[in-house]
Image: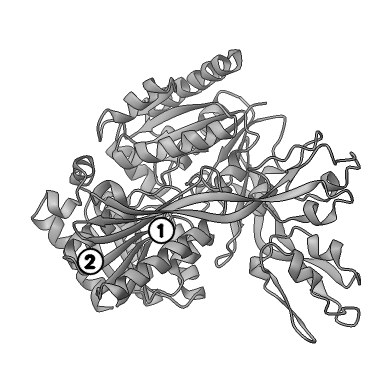
Amino acid sequence: MKKITVISGKGGTGKTSLVGCFASLASGKAVLVDGDVDAANLSLITKPVRLEEHEFWASKVADINLESCEDCGLCLELCRFDAISGGYIVNPVACEGCGFCYYSCPYDAVRLNDKLSGNWFVSQTPYGSLVHARLGIAEENSGRLVTTIRNKGEELAESEKKDYLVIDGPPGIGCPVIAALSGVETALIVTEPTVSGIHDLERILAVCRHFGVEASVCINRYDLGEEQSGIIEDYCLRENVPLAGKIPFDRAFVRSMIQGVPVVEYKDGSLSEKINAVWESVNVL
Amino acid sequence: MLNLAIASGKGGTGKTTIAVNLALTLEKENTPVQLLDCDVEEPNAHLFLKPELTHKQSVGIPVPSIDLDKCSFCGRCAEVCAFNALAVLKDNVMILNELCHGCGSCAYLCPETAITENDRPIGIVESGMVNNISFAHGILNPGEAMSPPLINAVKNLISSEALTIIDAPPGTSCPVVAAVSDCDFCLLVTEPTPFGLNDLDLAYQMITKLGISAGVIINRSDIGDGEVEAYCSKHKLPILQKIPWNLEAARYYARGEPAVSHLPEWQVLFKELYKNILSAREGAEAK
């Protein structure tokens, strides 16, 4: 089984639209994971039917019992996350659940409660199983939630004897991205021909190398910045990173999204051929 | 003065474009303005503003270091660490720095006072000026997982003398919360597509949970459908501006040039936007 993560550094370059296409092009041989757990969109173009729902309990939150509290102020002084207000009220968004207040309170007035950090789901789509999640609003631990669903995806791909695990990664380079890249052989970096796209490509490539993941590059909407597209191609050549393909700007991407289908099912012809070429190229890596 | 956050849920909707063009518009109107790029994983605003970065500081997380001569290997530090960053063996203590949140519990609670804390660098903050705009951004080191301490370091530079624009990262989790917390108002940038709408909803829920009032900017307003507008009117969320898709503006963006410096129609759009922000903010305060 081949594991592929689609990432970008910069957001909005077209990761999810492409993963939807790959799902369709893999014709039933892939398990899909939506690793963008705080803004998950893959389900909007893959018609999932939910089969399982799980709770994700990953963190703690402090709770101060005002009856036992003697107003000594130690917790206020020790907390490095400014999570405790003057009236000994814990702000659950700021609290990291480190337990410093719990262990150090001289009056045992602090409790650490488990906190529901999100939910994750296994769904059936016309393309195969989809594992996706919803991180609780303003929650932490997105990296651990990504790890949870990536592991579930792997388990399903093995038990269902699939050829591919395709992970739709989050933007950025931080913890959920690292979790989405962990243990995969290949990353496809989707970039755009803009100064931002180039800058962010360099940083996400550094992350791939840091973790020993092979990467290739796809330039989306290459015709909106022919000059920058050329700069990216030269950069890939210099860095010895394969160019998986170039996809033109096409309003069919938005129209197909509104229909709720991958663009390769909405419009055939040269656009679909180019996307298919990217998929083939990722396959042979 | 006002602290304005720019957030989006979905990536690539145009947060940095709005931040940069709004900053330039305000500067032209002689409003003191500061732009803080808090998308420390992928900071881009400097590519458009090209500020002269004259100050640079390293930002770190305080991580434990153990004096093995003092350590009795009692295991208390590993027991209290909520992030499994410490493992106590028979005659050694393993520290997994990248898991450490820098909370300080282990050092404080060690019965042998064998633990001291040292800053482990996770990135840098750079700052400087571009004409009359004061600018700063954070740059997270590739391979680092935790960005909020760096985001907070950038926000420590907030000036009370200027209108501060905070360019937030995409998403709705801890880095975004760190960036938008304590701001006076939030601009939610979206696009009129199903992905844009889904993530606008998540971002709006986050902002509401933090108790910050918000308005919406619909970028590329003519590319999709009317669902985002319907959502805004249902939730009484003010639409502060609609920016149509513009090939010329996209080409300027590709080259790293702010469109307000070239396109008169964008200057009008951003002047209007600022007016709409002020009146939406007044409306929110009145409530």
Residue B226 located left or right of residue A150: left
Looking at the rendered image, the quarter that the C terminus of chain A falls into is bottom left
Residue B134 located left or right of residue A167: right
Any mark on residue B244, and which? none
Looking at the picture, how far across and down is residue B15, in whole percent? 46, 40
**Marks 2, 1 in one chain:** yes
Looking at the picture, how far across and down is residue B16, in whole percent? 47, 42
Instruction: Determine crowd level at label 2: few under 14, some 14-19, many 20+ residues with C-alpha closer than 10 A.
Output: many
Q: Taking B239 as reference, is A79 above or below it?
A: below
Residue farthest toward the front in the current orientation of the protein? A67
Instruction: Determine crowd level at label 1: few under 14, some 14-19, many 20+ residues with C-alpha closer than 10 A.
Output: many
Q: Nearer the viewer, residue B33 or A279?
A: A279
Which residue in the structure is indicated by mark 2?
Answer: A278
At 55% from the left and 55% from the top, the residue drawn is: A57
Residue A228's quadrant in the figure?
Answer: bottom left
Q: Secondary structure at mark 2?
A: helix
At 36% from the left and 72% from the top, the residue drawn is: A155
At 41% from the left and 66% from the top, the residue drawn is: A150
Instruction: Please count the marks in the image.
Output: 2
Amino acid type of the residue tagged 1 in the rendering? Gly
Any mark on residue A35, and which? 1
Amino acid type of the residue tagged 2 in the rendering? Val
Q: Chain of mark 2?
A: A
Q: Taking B89 as reference, is B248 above or below it?
A: above
Q: Secondary structure at mark 1?
A: loop
